[in-house]
Amino acid sequence: MSARIIDGKAIAEAVDQEVARDVQSLVQTYGAPPCLCVVLVGEDPASQVYVRNKGRRTQAAGMVSREIKLPASVSQAELEREVKALSVDPDVDGILVQLPLPAGLDSDAVIACIDPAKDVDGLTEVSAGRLVLGRPGLRPCTPTGCVILAKRTLGDLQGAHVVVVGRSILVGKPAGLLFLAEDCTVTLAHSRTRDLASVCRSADILVPAVGRPEMIKGDWIKSGAAVIDVGINRVENPIKGPGATRLVGDVAYDQAVEVAGAITPVPGGVGPMTIACLLQNTLQAACARRGWSVS
Ligand code: NDP
C-alpha cells in the first residue's frame, strides 16, 4: 500500500484564501483590516525567513502586517515595554513574539506581557486555561494546523485513537487537548513512555512532535493509520555532497509511506499550516476585540 500524501501546502493555501475572503468582507463592512504585529529579536536566519513569510502571507490575506525588530542586545525591560505598548495599541489585533528569543531573555515573562485578547500564538496562561476548560479562545497555531489537516483528510475524527508523541507546551500538550475537543481518544507519549513502538502502533492518527530525525519507523505504524508529522529536523544530505543538508520529519517517511493510509511530507505538511492558523487567529482576535462579525 502507498499512503495518500496530505498536501499541507495546498490545504494552507485554501485556509489563507478563506481568511482573505473574510478579511475582504470585514473591510467592506467596517472599513479597516485586522493588524498583526510580529516582534523579532536578534538576527537568527531561520527566524528572519519565517517572519518574512508571515509578513508576506499576512499582506496577501489583506491584513496589515507590522514588524518590530530589536537587537539581540535588547534588555528584558525594554522588550517587555515594547510588548506592553502593543498590548494597549488599539490598532493592533494580534501580537506574536518570534521564539526562541536570544539567550538571556526570559520568554515566559515576555509572553505574560501580551494582552490575551491579542495572543494569536495561543501561548499566554489565559489562552492555555481556556483550552483546558474547553472555552472559546485563541489556540496555538501548529497543533491547530495538525487538527485541520486530520479533519480535511479524514472528515469526522470522533472516536479515533490519537497518539501524540511529545508533550511540549508549544505542540504536544495543546495537540492532545485539541484532538480531545474533537472527541478523539488521546494518548500523550513522551521520552519516558514504555514500549513507544507499541503505543504508536495503536494509533489511528499518529502525531509525532519530538524533534528526532526519522525516529518513528514503518513498523511502529498501524496499517492504514494517518500520520501527521510535526517534526522538522535538518540532517546532512550525502547525495548533494559535504555540507549540504535536507529537512526530514520525526517519521522515517520512505518506510511509513508504505504502511500508513495518509501521511504528511516534510517539508510541505504541517509546516505551511502554522502560518495559515496564525492568520485565522488574527482574524478571530480582530472580530472578538472589535465586536466585528463576518457577513
Ligand atoms: P520540544 O523539544 O519542546 O519537545 C519534544 C518532546 O518530545 C518532549 O515532550 C520530549 O519528551 C519528547 N521526546 C524527546 N525524545 C523522545 C523520545 N526518544 N521518545 C519519545 N518522546 C521523546 O520540541 P517541540 O514540541 O517544540 O517541537 C517538536 C518538533 O516539532 C521539532 O522537530 C520542531 O522543530 C517541530 N516543530 C514544528 C513546527 C511546525 O511549524 N511544523 C512548529 C513547532 C515545532 P519529554 O517531555 O519527556 O522530554
Image: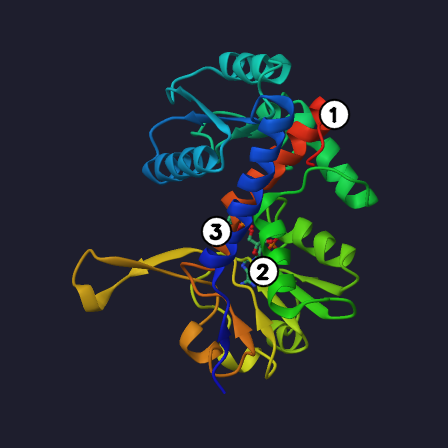
Residue 231 lies, in percent from the top left, at 48, 58
Q: Quadrant of residue 255?
A: bottom left
Q: CA distance from mark 1 to mark 2?
A: 29 Å
Crowd tier of the residue under label 1, counting other residues whose Cα lies within 10 Å: few below 14, some 14–19, many 20 or above = few
Relative horizontal placement of residue 193, taking residue 51 as reference (left or right): right
Helix, strand or loop at mark 1 = loop
Which residue: 73% across, 70% down?
Answer: 160
Question: What colour scheme governs how the chains and residues are painted in the rendered image of this protein?
Answer: rainbow
Query: Which tag, 1 or 3, sits closer to the chain's start?
Result: 3
Q: Quadrant of residue 131?
A: top right
Mark 3 vs mark 2: give the one in front.
Answer: 3
Residue 112 lies, in percent from the top left, at 65, 24
Residue 273 lies, in percent from the top left, at 52, 51
Q: Determine contact: label 1, label 2, CB under 8 Å.
A: no
Three-letter code for the amino acid on which mark 2 is drawn: Leu
Q: CA distance from mark 3 to mark 2?
A: 12 Å
Relative horizontal placement of residue 282, taking residue 267 as reference (left or right): right
Q: Determine contact: label 3, label 2, CB under 8 Å.
A: no
Q: Which mark is residue 13?
A: 3
Residue 116 lies, in percent from the top left, at 69, 27
Q: Quadrant of the C terminus?
A: top right
The residue pinned by badge 1 equals 291
Q: Which mark is residue 149?
A: 2
Three-letter code for the amino acid on which mark 1 is drawn: Gly
